[in-house]
Amino acid sequence: MKHLYIEELIEKLYGTTIQTKAEGECSVYQGGLQVLLDVFSKHKENQSILFFIGNGGSSAIASHMTADFMKNGGMNTYSLYDNAVTTCMGNDYGYEYIFSKPMEFLVREGDLVVAISSSGNSPNIINGIVTARKKKAEVITFTGFSEDNRAKQLGDVNLYVPCTKYGIVESIHNLILQQIVDLIMERDGAGF
């Protein structure tokens, strides 16, 4: 087995795009990374609260980034992954509302919601984005699979990985988020 997996990952990484309503689409490494850095920096300066949401592997990325953006980035983050809250929301309202119901109480105008979903079509992620939009929070989506996925159509800034393999999509999502928080830490110093 040569390095086919790594070669494909690198190819998909360089094919990853970032799209904004104002600036259109660009490659992640030809301006797109700066767009993301600018958005996160604005929210750090404004002391907004950051919410990361995702399912499965994406939930692990969301949980990890909640910690890293707080500790290393010095940002206000809030975890929606408390077991009691998640199971309560799932039991009382249905799994499709595990993010949107608590977000109705927690998200404020000017906050930032980062929705991570390989398919971009998970009902609980879409409901979370819709709630964030109603609350006038900014939304960044990290998706893959189909280019016309629902989440990508709803975000203010949309990172899209042109791939249908979970491992590659999730690895690129994690890599780029890690790079953003590392850039913030290099620029500002560790959060604590």
Image (tube, helix red, strand yellow):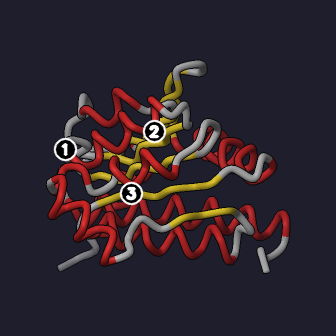
Name the side, left or right, on which 36 lies relative to 18.
right
Mark earlier in primary sequence (2, 1)? 1
Q: Nearer the viewer, residue 36 or 2?
A: 36
Q: Amino acid at mark 2?
A: Ala
The residues bearing labels 3 and 2 have C-alpha atoms spaced at a distance of 11 Å
Q: Residue at x 67, y 77 (%)?
A: 71
Mark earlier in primary sequence (3, 2)? 3
Q: Nearer the viewer, residue 179 or 41?
A: 41
Q: Which structural element holds mark 1?
A: helix
Instruction: From the image, tell me which residue sits under label 3.
Output: 53
Q: Amino acid at mark 1?
A: Pro
Q: Which structural element holds mark 2?
A: helix
Above-or-below relation of 42 to 166? above
Image quadrant containing the C terminus? bottom right
Q: Residue 180: which quarter of the image?
A: bottom right
Q: Amino acid at mark 3?
A: Ile
Disc number for residue 123: 1
Above-or-below relation of 81 to 125? below
Instruction: From the image, tell me which residue sits under label 2.
Output: 132
| Neighbours of disc 2 within 10 Å: few (<14), some (14-19), many (20+) | many
